Amino acid sequence: MHRFADADGFSSRIQQAELDDLVGSEAACRALAENYAGPPL
C-alpha cells in the first residue's frame, strides 16, 4: 500500500489497521484481488 508524505500519525495508524484487517481475511484479500484484476473468468 502507498504511504502519503502528508499523513499524520492518526491517518497512518488507520491505514495500518485497514491493512491488518485485509491480511487477516481471506474474503477481503479475494475482494481486493478481484477489484484490482477483475473477476475470475
Image (tube, rainbow, N blue to C red):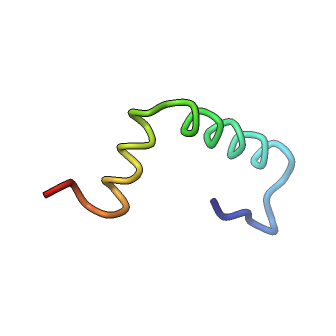
Q: Is residue 2 left or right of residue 8?
A: left
Quadrant where the image shows the C terminus: bottom left
Furthest residue in direction right, as rendered: 9
- Residue displayed at 32% across by 64% down: 37
Quadrant of the rendered structure where residue 22 is? top right
User: Which residue is at 66% across, 64% downward?
Assistant: 2
**In the picture, residue 4 is in which quadrant?**
bottom right
> How many marks can you see?
0
Q: Nearer the viewer, residue 36 or 3?
A: 36
Placement of 24 over or under 2, stated as above or below: above
How far across and down, in percent of the image, does residue 24 sit? Answer: 57, 31
Image coords of residue 5 (percent x, y): 81, 68
In this view, the residue in front, 1 or 4, is 1
**Quadrant in which the N terminus appears:** bottom right
Residue farthest front in this picture:
41
Q: What residue lies at 84% left-to-right and 53% top-to-bottom?
A: 8
Q: Is residue 40 above or below residue 2?
A: above
Front-most of 33 and 16?
33
Q: Position of residue 28 (x, y in %)?
A: 43, 37
| 34 over 22 or under it: above or below | below
* Residue 26, position as x, y percentages in the image: 44, 33
